[in-house]
Image (cartoon, coloured by chain):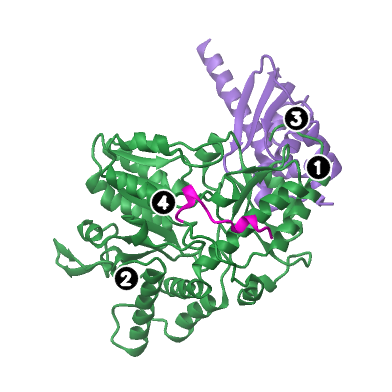
Chain colours: A purple, B green
Amino acid sequence: MDDLYRDYILEHYRHPHNFGILEAPTASYEGSNPLCGDRITMMLGISDGVVREVSFTGRGCAISQASASLLTDEIKGKTVEEVEKLTPDDLLDLIGVEISPARLKCALLSLDTVAHALAEEAVASQDATSST
Amino acid sequence: MTDTATTAAVGRTADVPASTPARLDARSLRADFPILATTNRFGKPLVYLDSAATSLKPQVVIDAVNAYNGEYSSNIHRGIYEIAERATGAYESARASVARLINAPEAAEVVFVKNATEAINLVANSWGRRNIGRGDSIVLTEMEHHANLVPWQLLVQEKDGDLEFVPITDDGLLRLEVYEALLHLGPKLVAFTHVSNMLGTINPVRRLTEMAHEAGALVLIDGAQAVPHLPVDVQAIGADFYVFSGHKMLAPTGSGALWARRELLEAMPPFMAGGDMIREVHLRRSEWNEIPWKFEAGTPDISAQIGLGAAAEYLMTLGMDNIAVHERELAAYAMTTLRREVPSIEIYGPAAEFRGGVVAFNLPGIHPHDVAQILDRSGICVRAGHHCTMPLHERFDLAATARASFNVYTLPEEIDALAAGLREVVRIFDGEPGRPG
């Protein structure tokens, strides 16, 4: 059995948590690894600085999809500030299997996509503030 | 091995020689490749099924490179002393070997470049910028490697020209009736691959060239996946430009060649400028050297090109006809074996009689990166991704594929090992169909 393909990783791949579409996300972003064809759209519902809802859609390898499943579980209910502080190492700890250098991009796509979604949210809320 | 694999090619594969009994002794020649004696971190022998990405190198090539570096390392076309003359001799003799391999009329028509990509960029920048103007069209195909697509995109963007594409059938064959219609547009150039690096399709290059010439177009052929695997005769094909990389044909990375007809090369302006490509330099003007040196500015990758010469000689000794038969048999064996052992497998591209030693596939619900990663544990190397053919993957609505590709040293039992490895992948993923991936 390959260490990378532990049962819980495969379980997250087959039955990902928080997989689907959020009806009214306050932030969303589509990230991709063009080289391997991994694609993830992260949707966040943020109010009062807290990630109340989160979901994702996408397709790709087991590592990228399991990573998104684990990450969305992790950030739900956390403050935006806490989510922004998550590092690649935090996510790798969460995934819990050794990721070879060639697969790091797959493993980290979910976090990168969340970071982009939060950045867009920040810009959008700033615009909203400045226009009022 | 199946006998059907050796059935004589018909129709579209008329450029492939009729079959002769395979005389290639792949088992013995493996001793020529030192890397095949190595094992991976789990002690498993190397099962190298990624030769379309780059080939392994035989000892004669390694020795040729080492001899240059260890015995006569010096610049070419300059020194008066003994080792410099030896280096120049070896470099030019490599050019003669390459010319013989592709039956070029003269060695001077072989321009050394670092790979097929550089060769295409050379033609696009030199011939293309002088000959393609506003409204001119270039015909390509949907199965081109990015190397035979992006340089033409840049050219027509600059010159306000147009690109047209020959579509392919679901089986991965060019649609010749559409090609014929596109030729009525009067393109200046037609550029296509000899053998597809993803589908494995062997294109009927002689016929495609003939049709293009009747329409008044010049023809560039990307032979990166052909020269290592098939007999290539540029005169019989009738091409105007023919390009290939050394590293896919048992030679070092950094070696490759552009062949073009003398009158074309002579009329073309230089692509890169600098030393060696000039006859006379004055402060405000220069005169160009003779071909091929006009296109070889600066010190080239001397040892790599000497290695390319050694690889060309090695291939000619094995016999390109024998190699073609060997690899066609492997492709047929792979398609039969993989479909039998892994029934869920999807294999892309044409039937075995139309293809070279390339088999791209997917296991439903399992991303090719996961396939490749699990195979790696067993020492099996396959490529996973889009293989620099994103438009072709879009054509088949695929994000990525896994690809096994063969060479002279590939054995049927390595394909058996691949089949066993794929069964293991399916077992790990438990056969449960995942989301479309």
The three-letter amino acid code for the residue at tag 2 is Ala
Q: Nearer the viewer, residue B119 or A116?
A: B119
Residue B50 is at least partly visible in this image? no
Mark toward the viewer: 3 or 1: 1
- Residue B214's place in the image compared with B52, above or below, is above
Where on the picture, by quarter, is residue A46? top right
Q: CA distance from mark 1 to mark 4?
A: 42 Å
Residue A4 rendering spot, x and y as whole percentages: 78, 48
The chain letter for the residue carrying disc 1 is B
- Badges 2 and 3, same chain: no
User: What's the magenta region?
Assistant: B1-15
User: In the figure, is residue B186 to the left or right of B55?
Assistant: left
Q: Are marks 4 and 3 on the same chain?
A: no
**Mark 2 or mark 3: which is in front?**
2
Counting from the top left corner in percent of width and height, residue B234 is at 36, 60
Query: Mark 2 packing: few (<14 Cα in 10 Å), some, or many (20+)?
Result: many
Q: Residue at x 39, y 42 (%)?
A: B140
Q: Are marks 1 and 2 on the same chain?
A: yes
Chain assignment, label 4: B
In this figure, which residue is indicated by the disc labeled 3? A72
Q: Pointer 4 and pointer 2: residues touching (CB < 8 Å)? A: no
List the residue tagged with mark 1.
B429
| Label 2: element kind | helix
Q: Residue at x 54, y 56 (%)?
A: B8
Q: Which residue is mark 4?
A: B205
Q: Amino acid at mark 1?
A: Phe
Comparing labels 4 and 3, the label whose residue is closer to the camera? 4
Q: Nearer the viewer, mark 4 or mark 2?
A: 4
Looking at the picture, tell me which residue is in the foreground, B392 or B239: B239
